[in-house]
Amino acid sequence: MQQSNAYIITFSVILTVILGFLLSGTSELLGPIQQKAIELDTKKQILGAVMPAEELDRMEADAVIDFYERRISSKVVNIEGEEVEQDTDGNALIAENVSIARNFKRSPEDRLYPVFIFHAEGNESEVESYILPVYGNGLWDEIWGYVALQTDLNTIEGVTFSHAGETPGLGARITSGDVQARYQGKEIFDEGGNLQAVRMQKGEGKDYSGEPHKVDGLSGATITAEGVNRMVESYLSHYQNYFSRQREGGDAAPEEQEPVALN
Amino acid sequence: MSTETAEKTQVQKPSEPILSKRRKKLITDPLVDDNPITIQVLGICSALAVTTQMQPTMVMALSVIFVMVMANLTISLIRNTIPSRVRIIVQLAIVATLVTLVNEVLKAFAFDMYKELSVFIGLIITNCIVMGRLEAFALGNKPYDSVLDGFGSALGYSWIILAVAFFRELWGSGSVFGYPVFENIAGLFGGGFSLATNGLMVSPVGAFIVLGLIIWVQRTKTGYIEH
């Protein structure tokens, strides 16, 4: 009886239905908690560009969210640097919900570019740094991160990088604090005002402290490093119009490059 | 897939103690004498992949224990209703469901671990130990025995990957469970020197070497020879 086709089909259908309910039930149940975890993770990554990761790790989840709300304001701009408030369907845009990965698939002209502004507590116009998301391809999978620029929109305050599947111990080192610290204080524009970005060099162990557009590379992970370079350079170039708008008017940054107090 | 044949269902005496000698063997056998990794050489892929650090390895070990115990229990409970022609796909469906559950729970409550382990948790489905025990044991034995068998095999897997992770994290990153051991040892001597970490240990090659050494030591002690 157990070998008859009818039995096998019935058995399979029942099993599938039970397992299906189990899985969709779990997904329903855990969905909101997962959403919160993802939100917290995103906010931690954004804040990671302007504060040390260890400090963030010590904070409770609620404290991170609270800190984020007090210190970060966000907006979305387009390639021209103009603020966009609604998406194509007329819904209000929230910078934190803009998927960089999804926008990456569009051509640069059609993408939405979130800007996260790290400001003094209680005063949104007292900007401390601009945090910009970057996204690109590593060796095996996607890589992404956030670049924080000081108010001169030239000096890098800090960066944070993440990856989906780079080689552990090699390319995956882009997430480590000491690799990211190499970017601090580097400059993205040359003296003529042309975008140079900051490039990881081939090889590792050299001193690039005198060179504002170069950082030490990743030994054994040249392709990941190249991916990081392409990602940083392309996204900074997409934000160029926004930079010039910021410099020209409104709540623009001061012209002189005075160092901003580190947080 | 399995290197063993199904054990014969033993004639149950009506009052077998909860942890009889036979049942204890179900748990202790896979720890050393019949270890899934070092003797049966199953589940090598994840043993190589997740063992760079202790903490994710611990999460991986707990996940495998959960999946194996639950899968063995479920399969054993419904073993008499499973049509033998589709038994493999039935096992696969149940294992996949359990693994997805683990993945979802990690995503909700331990997002950092989820990010780190994500793909390897999913790969528990293809871990030969799980399906191997289902085929070899759970299909022909009572639920309680199957649970013990699953627990034993998962424990045998767990202690090996934890041992590998211990040496890899210690030599590769100079720490244990994230605690900076090398730094502190250097600190004891006034910081006049530093202990170098070995980058090889962080790459999968390091796992091969450590695992090879463990197997070597174990086989020297037990005198096991492959036939």
Image: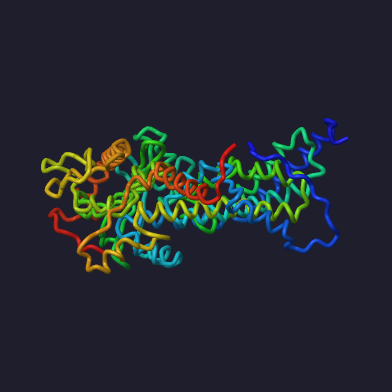
Where is residue A195, by image quadrant? top left
Give the colour scheme shown.
rainbow
Q: With A179 as the anchor, is B207 left or right in this view?
A: right
Vertical position of residue A232 compared to residue A73: above or below: above
Q: Quick one: which residue is furthest to the top in this view? A: A5
Q: State the residue in front, A1 or B107.
A: A1
Q: With A45 as the anchor, is B193 left or right in this view?
A: left
Whether residue B104 is visible, yes or no, is no
User: At 79% from the left edge and 47% from the top edge, which residue is drawn?
Assistant: B9
User: At 66% from the left edge and 48% from the top edge, which residue is drawn?
Assistant: A24
User: At 72% from the left edge and 59% from the top edge, which residue is drawn?
Assistant: B21
Q: With B172 as the anchor, is B211 left or right in this view?
A: right
Tell me residue B68's x, y (percent).
Answer: 64, 50
User: At 40% from the left edge and 66% from the top edge, which residue is drawn?
Assistant: A59
Tell me residue A185's x, y (percent).
Answer: 19, 53
Q: With B25 as the anchor, is A149 left or right in this view?
A: left
Q: State the residue in front, A163 or B199.
A: B199
Where is residue A215, by image quadrant? top left
